[in-house]
Image (cartoon, rainbow, N blue to C red):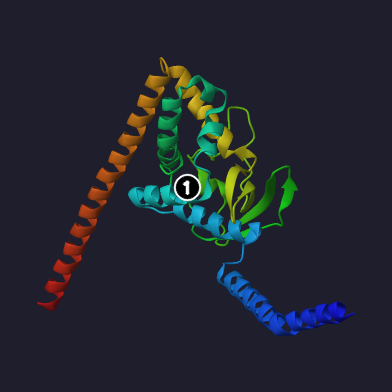
């Protein structure tokens, strides 16, 4: 009986002697976890993410200066596309025909290729509203339909004329519809706490498939994979040099216009 009393006394001593410290430690741990969670940025919804990134992408495509348009588009492309997956998907079945070294070269060139393909055209998306519908799950992806509306009465054809998205009529075809509201369907996939764009369909035309068809034609025109990559590199360098030269000319024109205005001001003072 004494042993039982001693055992119960020990339990009481342990509970009242040490439990407060244990409870205090647990409370402190909970506070630390709550504080850490409060410091972590809340994950954005796919709709909020696409609203921000989609607007940035359209703004980049609308920049008038070619050099600046290239720079902005390159920055946003690295931010919204998967750097490893996109080159492989765009290359399609030809990807397996490249050696590991050539695959690495293509991955390094791809986003510059994307920039000079789409950034060489000036889209006019400068005055639009950008509405994103709720995401719809599709396998591993999230499909988000966006509606882009011109606020100033411009139309889809005004914005995309003579671009990869422009719809030119063939002989005998009816003219394309000239509308001020059009849709872009984005396919997003989660990556950690963010998302990335797997593809976008602009009025039904896939950006990924356009690039794949373009690269397929260039691959077939080249004698082999090495020539294909060299041609791609030359195309990129040529376009970047042209943008640099154009930027220099535009700067000279602006300086001349500034000098002309200053000269007119001096004449008025006299």
Residue 27, given in percent of the width and then of the height, sits at 67, 79
Would you say 84 lies left or right of 45 here? left
Q: Residue furthest top?
A: 223
Q: Quadrant of residue 204?
A: top right
Residue 123 in view (yes/no) = no
Residue 126, given in percent of the width and then of the height, sits at 49, 58
**Count of labels shown?**
1
Q: Is residue 252 above or below residue 38?
A: above
Would you say 165 lies left or right of 260 here? right
Please report the residue visible at 20 percent of the width from the left and 63 percent of the height from the top: 258
Q: Dot 1, how many residues are within 10 Å of its Cα: few (below 14), some (14-19), or many (20+)?
A: many
Q: Residue furthest front?
A: 2
Q: Residue furthest right?
A: 1
Residue 75 in view (yes/no) = yes
Please report the residue visible at 74 percent of the width from the left and 80 percent of the height from the top: 14
Residue 52, given in percent of the width and then of the height, sits at 55, 60
Would you say 122 lies left or right of 93 here? left
Would you say 163 lies left or right of 41 here? left
Nearer to us in this view, 137 or 23: 23
Quarter of the image with the N terminus is bottom right
Q: Quadrant of residue 101?
A: top left
Nearer to us in this view, 204 or 137: 137
Q: Is residue 10 above or below residue 206?
A: below
Please report the residue visible at 23 percent of the width from the left and 54 percent of the height from the top: 251
Quarter of the image with the C terminus is bottom left
The residue where tag 1 is placed is 77
Please report the residue visible at 84 percent of the width from the left and 77 percent of the height from the top: 3
Nearer to us in this view, 8 or 66: 8
Residue 195, given in percent of the width and then of the height, sits at 59, 52
């Amino acid at each position: 009986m004494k042993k039982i009393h001693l055992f119960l006394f020990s339990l009481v001593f342990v509970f009242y002697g040490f439990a407060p410290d244990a409870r205090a430690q647990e409370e402190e741990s909970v506070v630390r976890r709550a504080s850490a969670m409060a410091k972590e940025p809340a994950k954005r919804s796919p709709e909020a993410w696409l609203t921000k990134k989609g607007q940035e992408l359209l703004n980049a495509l609308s920049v008038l200066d070619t050099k600046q348009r290239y720079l902005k588009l390159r920055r946003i492309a690295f931010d919204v596309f998967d750097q490893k997956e996109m080159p492989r998907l765009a290359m399609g079945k030809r990807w397996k025909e490249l050696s590991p070294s050539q695959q690495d070269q293509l991955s390094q060139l791809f986003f510059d290729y994307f920039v000079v393909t789409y950034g060489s055209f000036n889209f006019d998306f400068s005055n639009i509203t950008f509405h994103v519908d709720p995401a719809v799950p599709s396998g591993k992806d999230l499909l988000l339909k966006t509606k882009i509306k011109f606020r100033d009465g411009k139309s889809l054809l005004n914005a995309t004329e003579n671009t990869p998205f422009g719809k030119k009529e063939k002989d005998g075809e009816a003219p394309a519809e000239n509308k001020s509201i059009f849709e872009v369907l984005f396919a997003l996939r989660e990556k950690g706490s963010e998302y990335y764009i797997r593809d976008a369909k602009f009025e039904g035309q896939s950006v990924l498939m356009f690039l794949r068809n373009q690269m397929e034609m260039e691959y077939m025109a080249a004698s082999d994979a090495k020539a294909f990559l060299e041609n791609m590199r030359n195309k990129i360098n040529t376009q970047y040099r042209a943008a640099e030269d154009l930027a220099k000319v535009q700067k000279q024109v602006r300086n001349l216009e500034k000098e002309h205005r200053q000269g007119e001001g001096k004449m008025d003072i006299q």
